[in-house]
Image: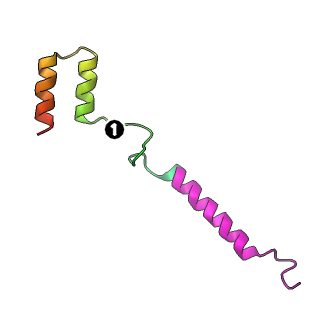
Amino acid sequence: MMYENYNFIGMHMLWWFAWAILLLWIFATPYNIPGQRTKKNTPLYILKKRYALGQISKEQYLDDKANLEK
């Protein structure tokens, strides 16, 4: 009877706070985390892309790849 008009407002506010934190975490975090939405353009990625487009030869690709992996 004592809490009849309050509906446990403390727990209700706690859940609103939890939802706000969750939404901020989803939409405000940077994208460079595991499972990121877009890939970074690393040097090896750019090299693979150039080879796939035919801009460089296989020998040049293998040589540059070996240099990048050192």
Main secondary structure type of the part rendered in magenta:
helix
In the image, residue 54 lies at what x, y percent?
24, 14
Tell me which residue sits at (11%, 19%) in the image.
59
The answer to whether 60 appears left or right of 41 in the picture is left
Based on the displayed image, in which of its 4 quarters is residue 14 positioned? bottom right
In the image, residue 11 lies at what x, y percent?
70, 73
The answer to whether 5 appears left or right of 38 in the picture is right
Q: Is residue 9 magenta?
A: yes
Tell me which residue sits at (57%, 58%) in the image.
22
Tell me which residue sits at (15%, 35%) in the image.
68
Give the amino acid at mark 1: Lys
Tell me which residue sits at (82%, 77%) in the image.
6
In the picture shown, does residue 19 fall above or below 5?
Answer: above
Magenta residues (range): 1-26
In the picture shown, does residue 66 fall above or below 58?
Answer: below
Q: Is residue 11 magenta?
A: yes
In the picture shown, does residue 65 fall above or below 13?
Answer: above
Structure colour scheme: rainbow
Residue designated by label 1:
40
Instruction: Answer few, some or many: residues within 10 Å of disc 1's Cα (few below 14, many 20 plus, some between 14 and 19).
Output: few
The answer to whether 7 appears left or right of 18 in the picture is right
